Amino acid sequence: MLVAENIQKLRSALPTGVTLIAVSKTKPAEDIQEAYNAGQRDFGENKVQEMAAKYEVLPKDIRWHQIGHLQTNKIKYLAKFVHLIHSVDSLKLLKEINKEAIKNQRVIPCLLQVHIAQEETKFGFSKEELVEALRSEDFKSLLNVRIDGLMGMATFTENEDTVRREFLYLKNLFEEIKASFFPISVHFKELSMGMSSDYKIAIEAGSTMVRIGSFIFGERIYSINQ
Ligand SMILES: *Cc1c(COP(=O)(O)O)cnc(C)c1O
């Protein structure tokens, strides 16, 4: 019952208005079911096929969040059911999501991922790239994707000042982008930032969605080819 306890602990610590995404990547369906039984409905995965397999066997009212880098050829596996894609990091990807959304006769909610960390390995738009994409005619023609906000990952470091600075940068950018491109949107309101190690700092900086894995489910064990 550890999973249920951890969920309750987090729930009572999160301010209202902050959604808890339980990151269940690498964890078996039984762990997800345990969290579900504790009332959790939002789950995050980073591998499309893993998410699709879990979708098939778990309760259909689970809201599935794609949080990891998404390849265009994988969109078709999640287009039918995904609740929110947090990791849109190019206009090209957004166009492909739009195509699959049309095939499935739906609108797919997305967040645009911004590169805020020092590590080069992390994905995401720079501020300049983001503004350029949002200004483009291509973007304006995409009617089957909806932009609900921004997502970012801070540098993996013990230095809390660095993490705080990066989250505040993203919060600022969020407000600027909202004012410039989505002034009357009721949907552009999500700021997905914060993981097990830094969610408290993220919430102080204005996060509305925290993506928490190891705090809930324990450390992940990766096989050599993951
Ligand atoms: C794995 C992952 C998380 C959760 O990480 P924890 O440290 O286990 O909480 C959050 N966001 C993304 C994008 C991830 O890949």
Image (spheres, helix red, strand yellow):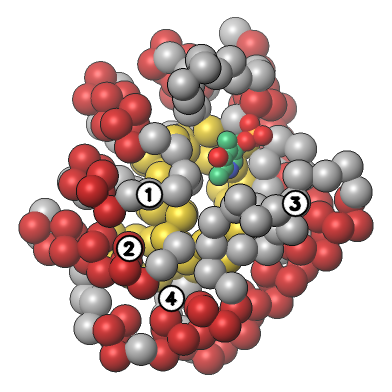
The span from disc 1 to disc 4 (Cα, nearest Å) is 26 Å
Categorize mark 1 by other alpha carbons within 10 Å: few (<14), some (14-19), many (20+). some
| Residue at x 57%, y 65% (from the top left corner) | 114
Whichever of labels 1 and 2 marks the residue nearer the N terminus, that label is 1
Q: Nearer the viewer, residue 40 or 180?
A: 180
**Label placed on residue 155:** 3
Find the distance from the CA under tag 2 to the CA under tag 3.
Answer: 24 Å
- Kindly state the secondary structure of the residue where label 3 is placed: loop
Measure how far apart labels 2 and 4 are at the Cα level: 24 Å
Tell me the CA gap for discs 4 and 3.
Answer: 30 Å
**Of the residues under marks 2 and 4, which one precedes in the sequence?**
2
Q: Amino acid at mark 2?
A: Leu
- Please report the residue visible at 38 percent of the width from the left and 49 percent of the height from the top: 70
Q: Position of residue 111 (x, y in %)?
A: 45, 62
Which tag, 2 or 3, sits closer to the chain's start?
2
Name the residue carrying label 2. 93
Label pair 1/2, CB-CB below 8 angstroms: yes
The residue tagged 4 is 186
> Where does label 1 land, which residue?
70
In the figure, 162 relative to 219: above or below? Answer: below
